[in-house]
Amino acid sequence: MSRQVLDELKRQIPLLDYLQANDWRPARRLSRGRFMGLCPLHEDHEPSFLVDPLKNLFYCYGCGRGGDVIRFAELYYQVKFPQALALLRQWLGLPPLLRETTEFYRTQLHRHSEAVAYLYERGIRSSEVIEDMRIGYAPGGCLRGWLTQLGYSRLALREAGLVTTAGYDTYMRRVVFPLEGNLYGRSLSTTAPPHRFLPGAKGGLYSWEQARQYPEVILVEGLFDYAALWQAGFRNVTCSLGTHLNARQFRQLCDGPRTVYLAFDADTNGSGPKPRNPLLTGWQSTA
Ligand SMILES: [Zn+2]
């Protein structure tokens, strides 16, 4: 990886923007445009995290760590350098509109007890997994107003599929999971179609950059299965978002030698094979 490519990535992702997208808020402004706030990398009670947006550098007086946006992603997500780059590229790839929508839905989640209750019922019980998967809630009837206020045109919202032609929020009473370039919405209501994506590709395997580091990978069908395994401590998990792998997902699975365990459940809706026990199959990829 050339120095030039890294510099270009850093130029495209100002440190302050990235921090703010990860919920960091400055506590006070210092001289020369610098900011001080609580450190997102350690349990901080007094603001000790210094950010210099002009130099695109941070330093924490509490835990002694500092660096650029790549270093921040490494420390924050506890990943190695190449994975940090991949995460940053992925973040960059998500259009600003979907990023704003994801953040808006995340703030809605804790304001709607029915959404939290639904997650609990589906086995999602730790706040860590909600944070990690950036799960949100679309109550319906408020996204359009929020995004319009931010300056997005109604046409842009319609084209992204976030608003219907009649002008209503597309996602109503849905738990929302951000994907690579799309948003998956699971309905809380039994009368609406349970699964919904925005128009466009569902993307690659879920959280592949993390899973691909392991020699053994567990492939599950849905995001709730993923969350259950994540809570049980598994990090070598990925999800196909349905029973069919698209070409991109298949290429990803085969991008290196590894053993893949398929853990698809025995649905009674006829969408998959019907073994007596949950299907667990291993296969070796030697690509
Ligand atoms: Zn710190």
Image: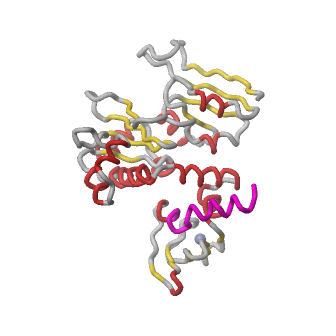
Q: Which residue is farthest bottom?
A: 31
The residue depicted at 49 percent of the width and 18 percent of the height is: 266
The residue depicted at 36 percent of the width and 54 percent of the height is: 104
- Ligand 1 image position (quadrant): bottom right
The reply to whether the magenta stretch includes residue 79 is no
Left or right of 127 on screen, residue 194: left
Above-or-below relation of 187 to 78:
above
Above-or-below relation of 14 to 144:
below
Residue 160 at least partly seen: yes
Left or right of 19 on screen, residue 260: right
Residue 98 pos. (x, y %): 42, 49
| Image quarter of the N terminus | bottom right
The residue depicted at 59 percent of the width and 52 percent of the height is: 89
Residue 217 pos. (x, y %): 66, 34
Tell me the chief SS of the magenta region: helix
Q: Quadrant of residue 233?
A: top right
Residue 248 pos. (x, y %): 60, 32
Residue 43 at least partly seen: no
The residue depicted at 68 percent of the width and 23 percent of the height is: 282
Q: Which residues are magenta?
A: 1-19
